[in-house]
Amino acid sequence: MKTSEKFKRKVLARWRMLSARGVDLGRAAVEIGVAATDLEMWIREAASGSPLFVPVWVEDEGVGERRSGVVVELGRGVRVLGLSVAELAELARRLS
């Protein structure tokens, strides 16, 4: 059975928290409930993989229009401008 990317992201987030507390990989794997070999592989994949967000520039017909709204900064220079509250909620839902 293939492990979902969402599950891997959650495991890696938990690993980062445990690692910051000084918990070693083997103990963390037991606490999370995954095999240490899987956890180690996912850590390596995450470290060598593509960034989660790739900056792009999207233009629509209203390029000259100024939109107000929320500005989200995702890191690595990625900014999302002019989101409504509903659009921000949808972005958060899709990124989780």
Image: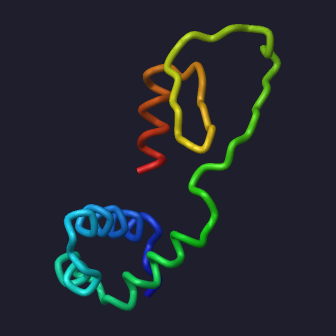
Circle count = 0
Nearer the observer, 22 or 95: 22
Indicate the quadrant where residue 24 lies.
Answer: bottom left
**Residue 27 image point, x, y percent:** 19, 83
**Residue 41 image point, x, y percent:** 46, 84
Give the position of the N terminus as an image quadrant.
Answer: bottom left
What coloring was used for the rendering? rainbow
**Residue 31 image point, x, y percent:** 17, 78
Nearer the observer, 61 or 14: 14
Asked if 22 appears above or below 30 in the picture, the reply is above
Residue at 52% x, 15% y is: 69
State left or right for residue 60 relative to residue 1.
right
Indicate the quadrant where residue 38 lies.
Answer: bottom left
State left or right for residue 52 relative to residue 54.
left
Residue at 82% x, 18% y is: 61
The residue at the far front in this view is: 22
Asked if 36 appears above or below 45 in the picture, the reply is below
**Residue 58 image point, x, y percent:** 76, 32
Residue at 45% x, 25% y is: 86
State left or right for residue 62 relative to residue 41.
right
Residue at 45% x, 78% y is: 42
